[in-house]
Amino acid sequence: MAHTHGTAEKQDGNLHLEWRDPPGMVGLSLKILLFKILTLGLYHFWGKTEVRRRLWNGIRLNGQPFEYTGTGKELFLGFLLVTVILFLPTMAYVVTLVFIFGPESWKLDLFLIPLYVFFFYLTGVAIYRAMRYRLRRTHWRGIRSTLAGNPWKYGWTYFWTALTLPFTLGWSYPWRTVKLARMMTEDMRFGDHAFSLDARCKPLLGPFALSWLSLMALLAALVAIPFVPLVAMPLAIVLFGVMIYTSLRYRAWEMNYLTGQMGFDGARFSLSATPGSLFGLFITNLLIVVFSLGILAPVATMRLFRYMVTRMRLDGNVDFHSIAQATDTVGRTGEGLIEALDIDSF
Amino acid sequence: MRVFTGTLSDGKTAAADRVRVIPETDGLRIILMDTGREDFWPEDVLVTSGPLLKGHDTLLSHREQPGTRLHVPDPALAGILLQQIPRLGSRTHHRRVLLPLVGLAVLVAALSAFLLLSDFSPSRIVAGMIPEKARIAMGDMLARSLAGKGGFCDNPEGIGALEHIVKRLAGSAPENVRPYRVRVARMDIINAFTVPGRQIVISSRLVTMADSPEELAGVIAHEMGHAIEIHPETSLVRSLGISTAIMLLAGGSSDVLTETAALLLQMSYSRKAERAADSHALRLLRASEIPAEPLASFFEKLKTELGKDDDSRLMELFSTHPLTKSRILHIRDAGTWPTRPLLDPVRWQALQHICDPADNL
């Protein structure tokens, strides 16, 4: 069966994105807990892989599921690798410094600064590499995705743009978000086709200003509590609510805008997140994770996936015939850096 | 014979064809709806990226054409395939993944048990390599943080009496070429601590609770035993090592289970350490002609105090220095030896008031 004719799509090229709840997520969560106990925690990486496999399978494009092809072994090896090449030398460096200068010396702090800087730089690199690993293990109809750029370049941008945040009192945040999202999205490939992101930061400034101002108002009210408690206390409670609302509103606006500016081939994405539904999702997920002592975390992740996919649309045309397989080489170890730095989201 | 519908893609482009899939006894017959062309995938070429699950749809690939994907949404096909080809199911997958992992975990547990039961202690070897200057600096920092806001007691008469006891104990043993630093801290708990660099902190409440200088000398001798065995340095290295090992095992995520395991590992070791410190204490007391019986009776006094009420300040002592009947017996079994007086009543009074301001005496 050497050649595909492409009869699965109707000729009008309608794109249909849907979500199907993977069955048995609660059972899977309990099974992972049991296996983790049996293996003294080693099953963590395999459990994570199994959760992802089901979540990816829940996303359907034109009826066909996405497929996660990563393995627990890759995640485990990646973690071991990073521990050996990063954490053991770091520990040795710190212990040596303590022995040379003593634990309370200012010289110790001086020599630790480069370490903090280096690790902050690595955070961006880790985010990019983890994303690349996941994309490379994401297949649809046997075609896989990837990130075509350089993790160190992204790490550098992540690092220096973060330095602008304190100097601008946080006002460079929307600009930084758009800049990083553009870097990431424009490096993204499905097969040999690139994604595009036609985004600027100006549309985000209005909602951002509102959330920034309400945060400042809240801080002002908190500062005033010792002086005029009867006025400032109720005001602070009201302003806390306002702050939560405006920051969720900004978050929803940002997600919708960035997704809406994203394109692939002849198709355009759109998302309809709302502050209220985001709030409901965060609160219910928090309750699920807290009351299950973290055991049902996979269920919470599944709900996040469901939220995103059911609110996302894909309109336009994609010429599936023209998309060929990605050609970059695929590494054999996975996202050790992000596991080690503990900044993983799912 | 059941006929399923699905899609087939060749992995070269993202396009797919609609197909009919017919499960046969030795494989799958695949018919392209568009052209009517037929293909047959024998059982042994069927592969999946993860185990096939009951109630899920089927996504298969061809062993010799890795990019190809055959997708059948009807969950019934997965049921048929699982019956026909058990290796595609999660049981095989679990056997392949879980058995080696459980084996590895058992190996790690056995190795840790061996290290705990044997006298071989890698942490102690590492602890022995820490330079003296670093030990003293580290220990001083710990001692200060233990003393907290109360600080150390500095009545000169009291310090003089305390130093007399320390000198008498230290002067008797050949390994005591480096000096000990013993301080009393204003603390409302009954406890004594040894920190790295041969430094000992005794709580003021323990000093006032002692009925004689010999009782206090016994406690100090015990703490000196910890210092000789470099227990504080070893336990620092060990807790660093254990938390690293557990971080590795738990894959970066430490939870209640692993934290408890770490605590248990450290606890069981410290019982052995207490016994070793007691043996040193007996040796030091004998060499400096101080009786051991007061130490035993002091321990007993603490034990009855504990029996009377569950004073949390006492509990603290027993959680760091597990006090058992066998330890008291161990001290009593050492027998008696010639003794001479340690402190006259005036100096003992001064030591009891070591935390008072200097002009009060």
Image (cartoon, coloured by chain):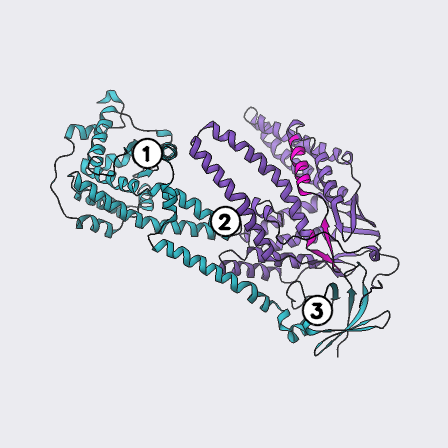
Mark count: 3
Front label number (3 vs 1): 3
Q: Which chain did the image draw in purple?
A: A
Q: Position of residue A248 (x, y in %)?
A: 68, 40
Q: Tag 3 or tag 2, which sits nearer the N-term?
A: 3
Read off the residue under disc 2: B247
Q: Please identify the residue farthest to the right as the structure is shown.
A: A12
> In the structure shown, which secondary structural element does the residue marked by tag 2 occupy?
helix
- Say which amino acid is labelled 1: Met
Dot in front, 2 or 1: 2
What is the magenta range? A135-163
For disc 1, the marked residue is B187
- The quadrant of the image that shows the C terminus of chain B is top left
Residue at 85 percent across and 73 percent down: it is B36
- Mark pair 2, 1: CA separation: 35 Å
Q: Amino acid at mark 2?
A: Met
Question: Is any part of residue A81 visible from this angle?
Answer: yes
Q: Chain of mark 3?
A: B
Query: Closer to the observer: label 2 or label 3?
Result: 2
Residue A12 % position (x, y): 88, 57
- Near mark 2 (Cα within 10 A), the count class, few <14, some 14-19 or many ≥20, is some
